[in-house]
Amino acid sequence: MEVEVKFKVLFDEIKEKIERLGAELVREEVQEDLYFDIPLPNLLRIRRIVNTGEVILGYKEIKDKRNEEFDEIEVEVKDFDKIRDILKRLGFKEDIWVKKHRHVYRLGNVTFELNRVEGLGDFLDIEVISDNVEDAKREIWKVARRLGLKEEDVEPRLYQELIKEKGST
Amino acid sequence: MEVEVKFKVLFDEIKEKIERLGAELVREEVQEDLYFDIPLPNLLRIRRIVNTGEVILGYKEIKDKRNEEFDEIEVEVKDFDKIRDILKRLGFKEDIWVKKHRHVYRLGNVTFELNRVEGLGDFLDIEVISDNVEDAKREIWKVARRLGLKEEDVEPRLYQELIKEKGST
């Protein structure tokens, strides 16, 4: 199970704090995610990682109301346009693009995904892979507090929900 | 458009004839195809090429009544079990396995796929990629006749149909 909490942050400030914690920069990615219109709590997307050329088909099942617990399957695919075409012909409708610049840091078994999301601003996902959700959340909140993050900084909505809400105002 | 005609053949006899035509052996593959249950005339399968480790997701639309004209999209995928799991969770039901040992020959723009299909016997698919279906068929039949193949050797049914018919007798 992938357990993660998303916080609204200020990029430069939180980046410095993460680095001061001793977390290691694992990679930097420019991600363009195309989401297909399947019913929540499930998500289907093709991710294109622009700077590496990788393409990843991803399927997620959201397991809780706060969008913090996910069952996720990802598989690398060779060609973005072809998998997009196959999904379209199978009847899946394209829904929304989420584009972001991501820095990935790691500290022990905690992963920090610091995202500058096009049109939305900056967010930090703190993630732990674990079958024990309570333990994972305790671990996430322990580092979150060390970064000065509080309950009111949590953003429970999905990026695609935020983009849609923004588009409709 | 992929245009192909399938013939019931005797493996060794037709192999020798193909080689005598001057066709070049391009590759040999052990293919295990898992078909999903989507409505005809469309086909969805994951192909595992056992001897190379490749995995290919394929979607075909059959364009004619004789199963000779196909619109096909194929994309390489990194992991058989993961794409299988994603398709299952998206609601696709597994239908049938087709396993075969294939020799692929080429002569000009004609491709010969000589298949020993598990449980079914030997078949030769003669294939031409062309947007002109009539020209493609003329070309296919020209070489078919040189191999001694006749209209009565044609097998219009799909491999998965043949396997199902066999299973139900």
Image (cartoon, coloured by chain):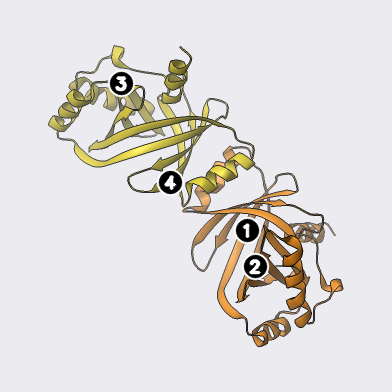
Chain colours: A orange, B yellow
Q: Is residue B62 above or below residue B78?
A: above
Nearer mark to the viewer, of 3 and 4: 4
Q: CA distance from mark 2 to mark 4?
A: 30 Å
Nearest to the observer: residue A136 or residue B24: A136
Q: Which residue is mark 2?
A: A100
**Amino acid of disc 3:** Phe
Q: Which residue is mark 4?
A: B55
Chain of the residue displaying label 1: A
- Secondary structure of residue under mark 1: strand
Q: CA distance from mark 3 to mark 2?
A: 52 Å
- Secondary structure of residue under mark 4: strand
Residue drawn at the location 47% of the way across and 35% of the way down = B34
Circle 4 Cα neighbour tier, 10 Å, few/some/many (<14 / 14–19 / ≥20): many
Q: CA distance from mark 1 to mark 4?
A: 23 Å
Q: CA distance from mark 2 to mark 1?
A: 8 Å
Question: Which residue is situated farthest in the left direction here?
Answer: B20
* Upstream in sequence: badge 3 or badge 4: 3
Confirm whether circles 3 and 2 share one chain: no
* Residue B98 on image: x %, y %: 42, 30
Q: Which residue is mark 1?
A: A33
Q: Which residue is mark 3?
A: B7
**Marks 2 and 4 in Cβ contact (< 8 Å):** no
Residue drawn at the location 15% of the way across and 30% of the way down = B21
Relative placement, left or right, of B137 versus A160 is: left
